Amino acid sequence: MTETETDSDRAGSGQLSGHPDPGSAMVDLRRVGANPDFWYPLALSGSVRGRRVIATAFAGERIALYRGETGAVYALEDRCAHRQVPLSLGVVEGETLRCCYHAWAYRGDGRISQIPYLSKGDGRPPRGVRGYPAREAYGLVFVFPGDPDKAAVTALPELPAFGSPKYKTMTFSRTVRCHYSFMHENLLDMNHQFLHRGVVGRLHPELLEYRTGPRSVEARYLFTHAGGKRNRGAGLLAGEGIGGGDSADVMTIRTDYPYQTLDLVPENAERPAFRLWAAYVPEDAEQRTCHAYGLLMIEKPRIPGALHLARPLIRRFAERVFAEDRTAVEAEQRAWEEQGEDRNHEVFPLILDVREVLRANGVPLRSQAATCGTAPADGPAPGLDHHAAGPGAPAGPESPAAPPGG
């Protein structure tokens, strides 16, 4: 585990003591925002090419990413302080970004470096635009949208399999029209395998155990194949080889706020056949759309080149599973919007636990009226109250292959 469990953590496979009544009044999770005080992937590194600018967003806060001539990546508030024209339409010159309209130039920290038509002594704006800490790792560009003072002491996720010679990584990036919490629930709750019956056959998931901590929920399932046609890509991903097979697999899934991981270990195997890491980044201010970024790290088979041959089959399998999951979670989001509230009748203790973790670590979504104004250049992001309440505070009124495991 990536987090040390304490005496207050809970473990088991049945109903947990201390659970709130599912029918009691509590904060609607779909009105809780993602905590900005973490590193979030906002782009694939390959999409931020030399001297290129791209437009991204976190929770309604538009952010321009650009790569300077030295290769460094910078993240700036995506508006010029002059006329509010998006800086993502601008031009990169050295390590600065120049607005396409009146050619105001900004350094990587958001400060104005030049207003070309002003003379010495002319009045200048006191501030430029907000600059965000940005780092590259695992083929992704991570941005810290929260309190910049916390960036230096907040670690990036640790993914030892990414650099291991025993694994090969596939990257995925997809937009999903739902609140990020639906994605956490979907991956953690493996009782929905009926949804994927046309791809994986009849799978029987048995919850072996789970643990809950202040920031995490981890579950272990035993998967057995009970018949039906199984997609060849599913077998290859599970390490069964070209001949296939019906092994019993142990799957460990963990929400470690705000990320998720999934490891699948085939029967009698020494290490996972694959490891998945995923993050769900809210894009709009109301956080009803998120962008899923992830890394699927697949164990290399003993036969050289076999994974290269199997890759197209694995990719097609992963895309199909993700498409089915996306259909389900987007339907959940539509129901929430039509009903104006969360009317789910959840009975699985594991999912009740992960909902509490997401509530406790999230932040309140600001009201729609509060998002209509313009935030100060160095102020908090629109759509989120970064400082009024921290974790635990109550809330107020296409691309490469997708991951398996849905």
Image (cartoon, rainbow, N blue to C red):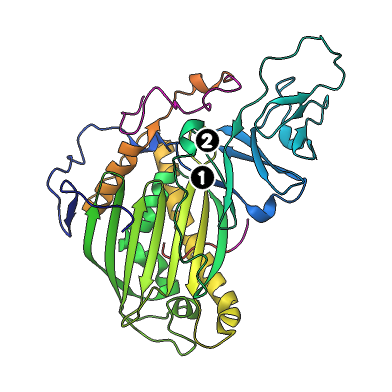
Of mark 2 and mark 1, the one earlier in the sequence is: 1
* Magenta segment main secondary structure: loop
Compared with 282, 367 (above or below) is above
Q: Position of residue 180 (x, y in %)?
A: 44, 45
In the displayed structure image, the side of residue 36 where residue 45 appears, left or right: right
Say which of 231 and 238 sits in front. 238
The part of the chain drawn in magenta is: 376-400
**380 in the magenta segment:** yes
Instruction: Give percent across and percent down for residue 4.
Output: 26, 52
Q: Which residue is mark 2?
A: 145
Q: In this picture, is 141 found above or below 315? A: above
Q: How many marks?
A: 2
Q: Amino acid at mark 2?
A: Pro
Quote the CA–CA distance across marks 2 and 1: 8 Å
Determine the residue positioned at 74% across, 27% down: 85
Of residues 266 and 125, which is closer to you in this image?
A: 125
Residue 104: horizontal and vertical position, in percent?
79, 25
Above or below, 403 against 9 in this view is: below
Give the amino acid type for the residue marked by disc 1 in the picture: Tyr
Image mark for residue 40: 1
SS class, disc 1: strand
Q: Crowdedness of circle 2 by 10 Å Cα count: few (<14), some, many (20+)?
A: many
Q: Residue at x 47, y 61 (%)?
A: 324
Crowdedness of circle 1 by 10 Å Cα count: few (<14), some, many (20+)? many
State which quadrant residue 364 falls in. Answer: top left
Relative to 160, 188 lies left or right:
left
Residue at image coords 51%, 65%: 162
